[in-house]
Image: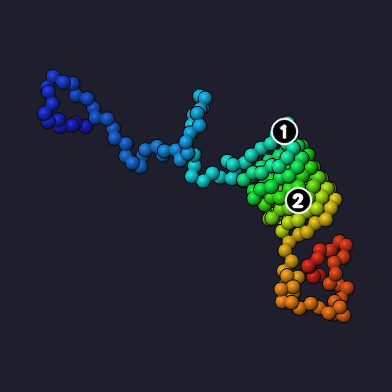
Amino acid sequence: MFKKVIGQDQNEPVRPAAPVPHPETRAPEPLVPAAPSHGAQVTPAPARPSPAATRNVLSSDVEIKGTVKFTNDLVVDGKIEGEVSSEGNLTVGENARIKAEIKTATVVVYGKVHGNITGSERVELKASAEVVGDIKTKTLSIEAGAIFVGKSTVGTPTQAVSQASSGSKPAASEKSSSDSPKQGTLAGTNS
């Protein structure tokens, strides 16, 4: 392309104009201040990190005594003694040995846990899992081969809550033996 130049000296060489980037082709600016890089290339941080990007891992050579708190996901393959609490998801790896009270949204156990587990959403015991302690959760999944020694409280009782809130209690003569939970059945389920 040719560019018409007005008022330029004949003896001065013609320089091509520097390209002006269009707003839609400019590189996005980082949303968070970049940490000093030691030869590493810095990429802009996404507006909302994906769950896979925020997964924390404690490898098998890590031992922690005390309270562990995290935000998103934590994979433990080491040893923890104390308490684990979060609104996120905990995965207990096959090499993990945990002696702790666990209170998270979901817990998936492949290793050993000695302590009570409270999962606000779900608890899964895989075939290699060994849990000694009580479990309280909305949904419980136990694979064949898993070891579980303790009590479990699964789900939220809707029938018992509605009777208690209405103030009506069945008379002792109305209560049949089929209403009381038996070993091997879950309370709150009718067959």
**Spatial distance from mark 1 to mark 2, Cα to Cα?**
21 Å
For disc 2, the neighbor class at 10 Å (few under 14, some 14 to 19, many from 20) is: many
What mark, if any, has residue 43 been given in the picture? none
> Going 76% across and 59% down the picture, which residue do you hit?
154
70 vs 29, left or right, is: right
Most foreground residue, 69 or 24: 69
> Going 18% across and 32% down the picture, which residue do you hit?
3
Amino acid type for the residue under numbered disc 1: Val
**Is there any visible trace of residue 143 in the rendered image?**
no
Q: Is residue 31 above or below residue 118?
A: above
Most foreground residue, 129 or 57: 57
What mark, if any, has residue 62 been given in the picture? 1
Amino acid type for the residue under numbered disc 2: Ile
Spot occupied by residue 170 in the image (x, y as percentages of width and height): 81, 78
Q: Which residue is mark 2?
A: 117
Quadrant of res 156: bottom right
> Going 84% across and 53% down the picture, which residue do you hit?
150
Spot occupied by residue 187 in the image (x, y as percentages of width and height): 81, 65
Spot occupied by residue 42 in the image (x, y as percentages of width and height): 48, 31
Secondary structure type for disc 2: strand
Earlier residue among tags 1 and 2: 1
Q: Is residue 8 above or below residue 64?
A: above
Q: Quadrant of the N terminus?
A: top left
